[in-house]
Image (tube, rainbow, N blue to C red):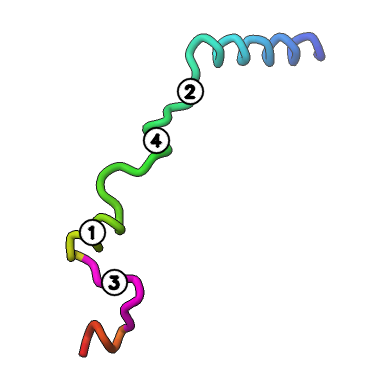
Amino acid sequence: MAFWTHLTHCRAAIREFIAPTYRPERHYMRGPGPACARRGGLLPDAGATFHSVFS
């Protein structure tokens, strides 16, 4: 049984080496973030309070 386990791990390592499953585009934010929206005037300032925004 240990032989098959070892063989399975080797096969998975070879497959990961040939065709890695890591896709960096899945881990990075796409599009403009909240800082860009604040610079563009779409969001209120981070330091603004509820009363100063809605009063």
Q: Residue type at mark 3?
A: Asp
* Residue linked to disc 1: 37
Residue shown at 35% from the left, 44% from the top = 29
Per the model, the C-alpha gap separating discs 2 and 4 is 11 Å
Image disc number at residue 49: none
The disc, 2 or 3, on the residue closer to the chain's N-terminal end is 2
Q: Is residue 14 left or right of residue 33?
A: right
* Residue linked to disc 3: 45
Residue 52: x and y, percent? 26, 86
* Residue linked to disc 2: 21
Please tell me which residue lies in front, 19 or 55.
Answer: 55
Residue shown at 25% from the left, 63% from the top = 38
Q: Quadrant of the N terminus?
A: top right
Residue shown at 33% from the left, 82% from the top = 49
Q: Quadrant of the C terminus?
A: bottom left
Q: Counting other residues with Cα less than 10 Å from the Cα at mark 4, is it few (<14), some (14-19), or many (20 or more)?
A: few
Q: Residue type at mark 4?
A: Arg
Q: Counting other residues with Cα less than 10 Å from the Cα at mark 3, is it few (<14), some (14-19), or many (20 or more)?
A: few
Per the model, the C-alpha gap separating discs 3 and 1 is 10 Å
Q: Quadrant of residue 13?
A: top right
- Within the magenta stretch, is there residue 51? no
* Residue linked to disc 4: 26
